Image (cartoon, rainbow, N blue to C red):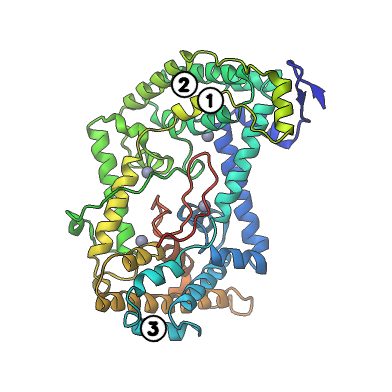
């Protein structure tokens, strides 16, 4: 322990301090990079060590696996297929057992679901409630913990000469992480330093002509790191939903919803609409993937505006009670004054992500339209959404029967996949089971790139800067 410049006791320099120092020297938001790297390490460890841990497996069953983003990160980056096959077979079997009379193995699912719909008045709603995740995505939980550690470390060492110089020379924290840091700051000097240094960083970045790949992550954060979901739309549109139903593999609602979000992003790009600044981090990344950043002008303008705003922010008033009184208040269990809290709130996006809204509208509209027999099984979220929509018992039955047969099929493929990983059978050539881990992830977590994770009633809804709520089922 040593004394800080302003007499505060500065904590020892832990690994997180040196991690920050190192990452601040690289381009992009250091906290995004660290959060992404450490979350990947967590998933990697889970893949190799914890897949067979009964406690971890039970938690994963309850949360219905990972959220969409982390499910695909696990399957694509951290795992070689076996861990995914084991985890998702477990979840799908468990989901099957939660269905009415589904106490037996997968073979009984079809029968139990065929009977479903003839019971009490609202069987769809009751089943949707059963299917809802109990608990948040394990990776989101880790991500949130790690982000808090790094934001706290940054604030605690803000008067450390090495770190403050590294921060002022860095390309800047992204806006969501700047807001977290401002909200965490305890002294007006820290707020003043952050607003000045980040105002300058954003102004510098806004001059990097047409480089949307740099500007966009600064405004919204890296994909999957600062998970931000908009509030659900009030109503939903049914118009044009038919046009969104296209042939293809997997959940038709996922497919149509992703297409609807893409269409909205293209509209924003061609209109040079400033609403692109409200895109969530996942849709912002998608925007870049779609090549919609033809000149990057709009990002430069948004960043320049943000930089000006930060540089024009007056210094927050010093706490009238002084740091020692504040420390005593904290010891006495009273809230510590946070001089940057108001500014952090003011910098929050005032509107929901337009692509998320388009996606959610499409999810509702397409689910209402999709006829199961024609279009194939739905992912778990969209299946539950279908159960919640007002539907006649016959449609519910056909929806559930098709779902059950998809579960049976995938469980058989996953079992075959797991069997062939046994050293005694590795000489057998791969068959249709080869891509079953990916198909299982899609069937549970939804298609790759489906940004929303909050469709299922009771599903955790991660919000930027906050731990995902553990809300109960709303159904
Ligand atoms: Zn960031
Ligand atoms: Zn997650
Ligand atoms: Zn889906
Ligand atoms: Zn979005």
Query: Looking at the picture, does residue 132 appear above or below residue 193?
Result: below
Neighbour class for label 3 at 10 Å: few (<14), some, many (≥20)? many
- Whether residue 169 appears in this view of the structure is no
Identify the residue shown where x is 53% and y is 42%: 466
Residue under numbered circle 3? 110
Residue farthest to the right? 1
Indicate which disc residue 202 carries. Answer: 2
Alpha carbon distance from label 2 to label 3: 57 Å
Residue under numbered circle 1? 172
Query: Looking at the picture, does residue 410 appear above or below residue 444?
Result: below
Neighbour class for label 2 at 10 Å: few (<14), some, many (≥20)? many
Residue 432 quadrant: bottom left
Alpha carbon distance from label 3 to label 1: 54 Å
The numbered mark, 2 or 3, whose residue comes first in the sequence reads: 3
Q: In the image, is the residue at mark 2 within 8 Å of ligand 1 by its beta carbon?
A: no
Indicate which disc residue 64 carries. Answer: none
The numbered mark, 1 or 2, whose residue comes first in the sequence reads: 1
Task: Report the image quarter containing ligand 3.
Answer: bottom left
Q: In the image, is the residue at mark 1 within 8 Å of ligand 1 by its beta carbon?
A: no
Residue 369 quadrant: bottom left
In front: 249, or 103?
103
Q: Is residue 285 left or right of residue 333?
A: left
The x, y position of residue 407, in whole percent, is 42, 75
Q: Are marks 3 and 1 in contact (CB under 8 Å)?
A: no
Residue 273 quadrant: top left
The x, y position of residue 277, in whole percent, is 36, 31
Judged from the image, the secondary structure of the residue bearing numbered disc 2 is helix
Q: Is residue 150 left or right of residue 365?
A: right
């Amino acid at each position: 322990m040593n004394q800080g410049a302003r007499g505060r006791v500065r904590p020892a320099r832990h690994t997180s301090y040196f991690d920050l120092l190192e990452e601040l020297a690289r381009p992009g938001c250091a906290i995004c990079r660290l959060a992404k790297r450490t979350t990947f390490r967590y998933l990697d460890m889970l893949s190799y060590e914890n897949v067979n841990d009964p406690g971890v497996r039970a938690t994963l069953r309850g949360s219905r696996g990972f959220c969409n983003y982390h499910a695909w990160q696990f399957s694509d980056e951290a795992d070689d297929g076996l861990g995914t096959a084991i985890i998702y077979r477990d979840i799908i079997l468990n989901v099957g057992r939660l269905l009415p009379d589904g106490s037996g193995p997968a073979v009984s699912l079809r029968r139990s679901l065929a009977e479903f719909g003839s019971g009490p008045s609202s069987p769809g709603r009751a089943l949707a409630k059963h299917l809802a995740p109990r608990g948040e995505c394990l990776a989101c939980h880790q991500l949130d913990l790690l982000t808090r550690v790094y934001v706290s470390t940054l604030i605690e060492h803000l008067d450390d000469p090495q770190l403050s110089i590294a921060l002022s020379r860095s390309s800047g924290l992204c806006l969501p992480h700047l807001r977290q840091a401002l909200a965490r700051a305890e002294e007006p000097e820290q707020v003043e330093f952050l607003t000045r240094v980040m105002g300058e960083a954003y102004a510098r970045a806004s001059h990097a002509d047409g480089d949307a790949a740099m500007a966009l992550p600064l405004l919204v954060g890296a994909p999957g790191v600062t998970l931000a979901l908009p509030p659900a739309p009030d109503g939903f549109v049914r118009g044009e939903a038919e046009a969104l139903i296209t042939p293809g593999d997997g959940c038709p609602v996922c497919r149509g919803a992703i297409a609807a979000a893409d269409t909205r992003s293209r509209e924003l790009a061609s209109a040079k609409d400033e609403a692109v600044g409200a895109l969530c981090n996942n849709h912002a990344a998608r925007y870049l993937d779609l090549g919609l950043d033809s000149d990057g002008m709009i990002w430069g303008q948004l960043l320049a505006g943000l930089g000006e705003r930060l540089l024009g922010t007056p210094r927050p008033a010093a706490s009238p009670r002084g740091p020692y009184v504040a420390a005593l208040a904290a010891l006495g269990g009273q809230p510590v004054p946070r001089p940057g809290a108001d500014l952090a709130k003011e910098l929050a996006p005032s509107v929901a992500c337009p692509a998320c809204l388009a996606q959610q509208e499409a999810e509702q509209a397409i689910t209402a339209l999709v006829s199961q027999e024609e279009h194939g099984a739905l992912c778990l979220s969209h299946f539950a959404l279908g159960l919640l929509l007002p539907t006649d018992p016959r449609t519910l039955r056909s929806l559930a029967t098709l779902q059950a047969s998809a579960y049976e099929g995938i469980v058989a493929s996953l079992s075959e996949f797991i069997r062939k990983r046994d050293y005694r059978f590795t000489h057998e050539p791969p068959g249709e089971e080869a891509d079953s881990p990916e198909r299982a992830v899609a069937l549970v977590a939804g298609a790759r790139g489906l940004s929303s994770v909050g469709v299922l009633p009771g599903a955790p809804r991660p919000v930027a800067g906050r731990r995902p709520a553990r809300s109960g089922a709303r159904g």
